[in-house]
Image: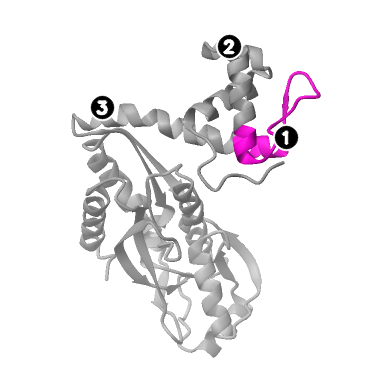
Amino acid sequence: MREPSPTLPFDLRSLEIFLAVCESGAMSSAARALGLTQPAVSLAIGDLEKKLGFDLFDRSVRPLAVTVAGGLLRQRAGALIAEARQIGPLLRETEHGKVPLIRVGLVDSLSRLLTAPLATYLASKADEVSILLGLTASHASDLLTRRLDLFLGVDDLEDWAGLERWQLAKEPYILLLPAGTEAPRTVAALRKLSQSLPLIRFSSRSQTGVEIEAHLRRLGLELPRSFEFDTPYGVSSMVAAGSGFAITTPLCIGEAALAAQGLVTAALPGPQISRKLTLVARHRELGRLPRELGEMARGVLVNAGASQ
């Protein structure tokens, strides 16, 4: 095959034709579906293959099967076409001051405080609001692949260009201990505590868990592993049951809503660490909305005593 052209090797119409052939498995069927002639479809596919520098279909079988390159293009082309089809309705909706859909990712530890305020605020900005709870890593991936419009979480994606960021809060990591447990005041005391009371961990899938583990390594602590959870409630409930202690944050404790269990909080021995919560959106794609949403969210957290 020839080397691909350095210019953009396709347009949206050629991708639409390609996807139609993928769906139907035949040039003739795709032509009927699109209202084109079969030669026109064959020519478009041949031209696309020539510009890309790869065969997209295995023509030795019927129905046509995509090659490895064709399969990859099919995945990406579907997303591009879907995005393109949203442009017209999106532009029409802006005449009324609203967008059709806003998709937001919200880290679990903010859900109790921010779900309702976010939904109420965004209802005035969009006809449909989707708020997805979960891990920051998942939300970050969805933002970068355009399955989310913005997220509020622990990772500000500082290594990625083309994003805007609004800090919402900064909070310390602290100890959470079962009722009646004496708080360790030194790193040595923390190590001793772990020998009788295991550390209940945030999982390594969570950014909070990653930050805590990195801090323990800096302290030279290799604490025995027992339980780990993705959610603040999972961690705090195990501490409330007397099954161990945790390194967590005030927001995570508040999210778990277990204050009535007589849990003990204390400063983390040794060097203090904290985590930042940030709103991240693609740069200039939503106008003033990310900034206004960030200011609203920060105000809620300040009123709740959760922001430094």
Q: Residue at x 35, y 70 (%)?
A: 171
Q: Position of residue 160 (x, y in %)?
A: 44, 61
Dots 3, 2 in contact, CB < 8 A: no
Q: How many marks?
A: 3
Residue 276 visible, this orientation: yes
Q: Which label's residue is closer to the chain start, 3 or 2?
A: 2
First of labels 2, 1 by sequence position:
2
215 magenta-colored: no
Q: Which mark is residue 37?
A: 2
The amino acid marked with disc number 3 is Arg
Q: Is residue 51 above or below residue 299?
A: above
Q: Nearer the viewer, residue 118 or 243?
A: 118
Q: Which residues are magenta?
A: 48-73
Question: Which label sits in the foreground, 3 or 2?
Answer: 2
> Is residue 67 covered in magenta?
yes
Secondary structure beneath disc 2?
Answer: loop
